[in-house]
Amino acid sequence: ETGVTQTPRHLVMGMTNKKSLKCEQHLGHNAMYWYKQSAKKPLELMFVYNFKEQTENNSVPSRFSPECPNSSHLFLHLHTLQPEDSALYLCASSQEATAAGNTGELFFGEGSRLTVL
Amino acid sequence: DAKTTQPNSMESNEEEPVHLPCNHSTISGTDYIHWYRQLPSQGPEYVIHGLTSNVNNRMASLAIAEDRKSSTLILHRATLRDAAVYYCILSSGGGADGLTFGKGTHLIIQP
């Protein structure tokens, strides 16, 4: 148990569906992240939220739409996805790294396995 | 972020020490060295991190070369549960920028 909970754990959707992935952290962190892990590829950082504000969007297609209503919750809204979007989507949180030595260790959830048909 | 180089895979025997190398010749003076591991069907988990000095914790030890251009993660007594992909990552710290993961080293533990 890492303190980061992702739901659903598994999702199968058609290309015309709209679905959402949810992430909740119980660690009091102020930064949250979405990563994508495709088969045989490294983890790819998709979005970063810091104090509910999006601070990074790594050229992610608009069919992925993140939402961060508060520091504890992060959503990834999915619509008109393609089969190549099938992957493990991982959420992580961290305390903002500071000059005092906290390096912002990431705590990951177990991921949501997405299959697009 | 500066790049790291790790072997694609390594194999070790159970109950023996494991030394996982990482090269980072372009590391900058403010880059921290982080190690994470990802067990099958799980998200990555933090293992250890360091800046200049060697570090020990309950999971592993981190040995950092004097010129900081390489480091070694040491598992003192590997178990089957240590079979995972191990990632060596550099970050400059500060802010909340996330970490950039490479392909890592797939560690296989033989019973």
Image (tube, coloured by chain):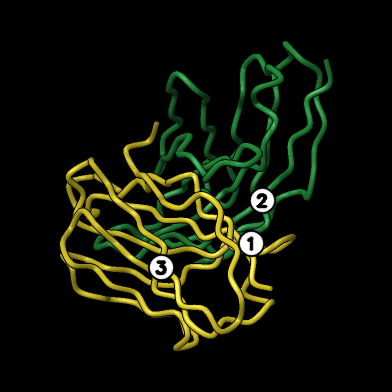
Chain colours: A yellow, B green
Quadrant in which residue A14 is drawn: bottom right
Q: Which residue is mark 2?
A: B104
Question: Could you give the CA–CA distance between mark 2 and mark 1, rounded to whole angstroms?
Answer: 8 Å
The residue at 47%/85% (across/down) is A63
* Mark 2 Cα shell of 10 Å, populated few (<14), some (14-19), many (≥20): many
A18 or A47, nearer to the observer: A18
* Mark 1 Cα shell of 10 Å, populated few (<14), some (14-19), many (≥20): some
Q: Chain of mark 2?
A: B
Quadrant in which residue B56 is drawn: top left
Q: Which mark is residue B85?
A: none
The residue at 52%/78% (across/down) is A17
Left or right? Give the position of A72 relative to A20: left
Asked if badges 3 and 1 are on one and the same chain, I answer yes
Question: Could you give the CA–CA distance between mark 3 and mark 1, rounded to whole angstroms?
Answer: 23 Å
Q: Which residue is mark 3?
A: A20
Disc 2 versus disc 1: nearer the observer = 1
Residue A93 sits above or below residue A114 on the image: above
Mark 2 and 1 residues: CB-CB less than 8 Å, in contact? Answer: yes
- What element does badge 2 sit on? loop
Q: Which residue is mark 1?
A: A42
Mark 3 and 2 residues: CB-CB less than 8 Å, in contact? Answer: no
Left or right? Give the position of B65 relative to A4: right
Disc 3 versus disc 1: nearer the observer = 3
Q: Chain of mark 3?
A: A
Residue B88 x %, y %? 57, 48
